[in-house]
Amino acid sequence: MRKVILDLAVTLDGFIEGLNGEIDWCIMDTDIGAGEKSFLETFPEEIDTVFYGRKSYELYGNYQPEKESGFKDFYDKINRMKKYIFSSTLKNAGEHTVIRDNIIKEVNQIKNQKGKDIWLFGGASLITDFINNNLIDEYRLAVHPVILGDGKPLFQSIKQRLNLELIEAKPSKSGVTSLYYKPVSVK
């Protein structure tokens, strides 16, 4: 079965955006998650599908960074992948699929299809729905060395406790630490 992987940047104090939606604190470092190969090289090889909420899709579903940024190849690969947008208001997403309801059923059907793992890109309310319905198989958080003090929290309106087991921690030269967790059952 394919895994749903939540992989995103978060501040040390748990925010994914500033008060005005800003992400200027996010260190765009090609070394993040680097071992022998960086995140930019390995992650697109692990996945072939991306899950977006409507707002995240509209902002980043076809994102094209500047060639000089070092992220162009990464986003070229991501932009060619199968995309599902979870929204009750989005009318059209071109060749991509819009899921309006029955999230648990739809996600489990997609997870049971042949293919690579699935990236849960976000946003915050979609992530909350996935957490509350136990649909995330792995959490990969790139913790950035900044404290915003306020903004949009990663975890909000969580209905029950979720215990996680640390799989791996990867520091980078920039100070970003990638933390990999998997959910564990409470006995």
Image (cartoon, rainbow, N blue to C red):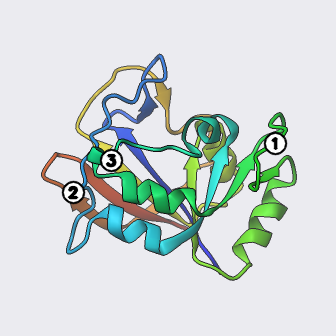
Disc tally is 3
Point out the residue furthest to the top here. 20
Which-is-in-front pick, marks 1 and 2?
1
Q: Residue at x 45, y 74 (%)?
A: 45
> Could you classify mark 2 by the number of other residues whose Cα lies within 10 Å: few (under 14), some (14-19), or many (20 or more)?
some
CA gap between label 1 and label 2 equals 36 Å
Quadrant of residue 91 within the rendered picture = top right
The residue where tag 1 is placed is 92
Judging from the image, what secondary structure is the residue with disc 3 in? helix
Position above or below: 57 against 98: above
Q: Residue at x 20, y 75 (%)?
A: 36
Position above or below: 18 against 120: above
- Residue 63, image x and y in percent? 51, 43
Who comes first in sequence, dot 1 or dot 2?
Answer: 2
The numbered dot on residue 67 is: 3
Amino acid found under the numbered disc labelled 2: Asp
Q: Residue at x 64, y 34 (%)?
A: 55
Is 75 left, or right, of 158 in this rendering? left
User: Residue 122: in sight, yes or no?
Assistant: yes
Position above or below: 128 against 136: above
CA gap between label 1 and label 3 equals 29 Å
CA gap between label 2 and label 3 equals 17 Å
Quarter of the picture containing the C terminus is bottom right
> Could you classify mark 1 by the number of other residues whose Cα lies within 10 Å: few (under 14), some (14-19), or many (20 or more)?
few
- Residue 17, image x and y in percent? 45, 29
The residue where tag 2 is placed is 31
Who comes first in sequence, dot 2 or dot 3?
Answer: 2
Judging from the image, what secondary structure is the residue with disc 1 in? loop
Which residue is nearer to you in this view: 128 or 91? 91
